[in-house]
Each structure stands twice: as structure tokens, then as C-alpha cells.
Image (spheres, helix red, strand yellow):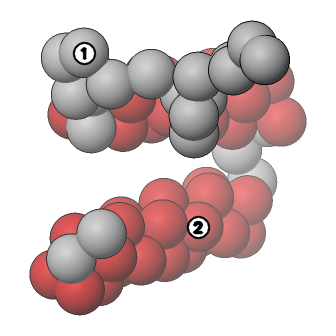
Amino acid sequence: MDIRTRRLELISFIAVLVTGIILIWLGVPPETLTAVGVGLSGLYGAVHHRPGHTASASPARTL
């Protein structure tokens, strides 16, 4: 993974974390925070989706 990609992901993570902290500080109900979290994670998954890329690191081998 390239350093720019890692840096961008770190910035994104910190931005989402700070947003959650600010919303809690403003008194937003936990149910709303859950909905916002699910929405943001779906958006993150859509932006970082790589066609043809699977979650497994290596295919199973048979001997």
C-alpha cells in the first residue's frame, strides 16, 4: 500500500472520529450516532471498493 493512500485513510479515520466526538459533545442521541456511523462506513466501503479484489490474502492450496 502506498504512503499517500495510508495517509489519506488515516486522515479519513481521524475526521470520522472527530465528527463522532463533536456530535456526542453536542448531545446527539446514541441511536442517531449509530445511523451516522453505519452511513459513513457504507460510504467508506463504496469509495474504497476495488473490483476483483477479495478479502482473503491467499487462495487455499491443496497438496
User: Is 54 in front, or is 12?
Assistant: 54
In the rendered image, which residue does mark 1 sit on? Answer: 52
The quarter of the picture where residue 21 lies is bottom right
Q: Quadrant of the N terminus?
A: bottom left
Which residue sits furthest front?
Answer: 63
Q: Image point 45% across, 22% down: which residue?
A: 54
- Measured as percent of width and height from the top left, residue 37 is found at 60, 35
Q: Image point 21% across, 76% down: which residue?
A: 2
Which structural element holds mark 1?
A: loop
Q: Quadrant of the C terminus?
A: top right
Identified by mark 1, the residue type is Gly
User: Is 31 in front, or is 59?
Assistant: 59
| Residue 28 sits above or below residue 46 on the image | below
Q: Is residue 13 among the parts visible in the rendering?
A: yes
The quarter of the picture where residue 32 lies is top right
In the rendered image, which residue does mark 2 sit on? Answer: 17
In this rendering, would 32 be left or right of 57?
Answer: right
Q: Nearer the viewer, mark 1 or mark 2?
A: 1
The quarter of the picture where residue 8 lies is bottom left
> Which numbered disc, 1 or 2, marks the residue that appears first in the sequence?
2
